[in-house]
Image: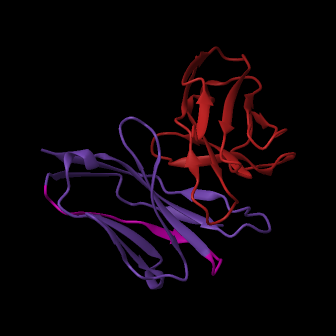
Amino acid sequence: AQKVTQAQTEISVVEKEDVTLDCVYETRDTTYYLFWYKQPPSGELVFLIRRNSFDEQNEISGRYSWNFQKSTSSFNFTITASQVVDSAVYFCALSELAGGTSYGKLTFGQGTILTVHP
Amino acid sequence: NAGVTQTPKFQVLKTGQSMTLQCAQDMNHEYMSWYRQDPGMGLRLIHYSVGAGITDQGEVPNGYNVSRSTTEDFPLRLLSAAPSQTSVYFCASSYLPGGYEQYFGPGTRLTVT
């Protein structure tokens, strides 16, 4: 069975600090997909990134970067120079390929509440 | 494009009442799913559908029914509401199951008293 663990329940930083959100996953499949979603205080879920298991290249998008390491089953998310608008709940999620009993469902971690203080 | 829409946004039910949460998408997506979000537990899959006429159970299906008569609509029925079903419910859709981005609706906050 697939599992995602976000060990950091809450993180509090001051604006302009860098912050890393950890994500560790478990899966028996060799082909899988990892996601990060953001849930701002307004409540909607905003897609941030998707990474497939064959692409270990790190990705940077503005102040956001993602570090995927298959050797440690981790997919960590770093926000550089954090801003108050980054305050949200961040979810890491895992999806296996559709097939068998999996049907490509998303399994979410528990979420990390990030608060950025001015 | 409306994307994924959900109604109602808020609902209060008494224990034992039934109701249907509506979900619709206009992206011609085959895969649709329902999640519930509870504090500290992330989102958990209730039911999903891989196309019209095909549905199956997720992680926490008890107390909920679904059907999928069209590609666009995927309603979630609470048969006899219980306080344990107090939660925020999200509907999602994607082009296909597996590694495709899932688009989420705005959510329905349900309270059962």
Tell me what residue is drawn at x 21 percent, y 64 percent. Answer: A80
- Tell me residue A110's x, y (percent): 47, 52
**Could you tell me residue A63's position as x and y percent?**
25, 63
Q: Position of residue A104 (x, y in %)?
A: 68, 62
Q: Is residue A30 magenta?
A: yes
Q: Is residue B31 left or right of residue B110?
A: right
The residue positioned farthest toward the right in the image shown: B53
Query: Which quadrant does the C terminus of chain A fall into?
Result: top left
Task: Judge whether residue A112 is colored magenta.
Answer: no
Please state which of residues A26 and B55 is positioned toward the viewer in this rendering: B55
- Is the N terminus of chain A in the top left, top right, bottom left or bottom right quadrant? bottom right
Figure colour of chain B: red
Magenta stretch, main secondary structure, is loop
Q: Say which quarter of the image contains residue A53.
A: bottom right
The residue at the far front in this view is B1
Q: Residue at x 70, y 59 (%)?
A: B96
User: What colour has chain A?
Assistant: purple
The magenta stretch spans which residues? A16-31
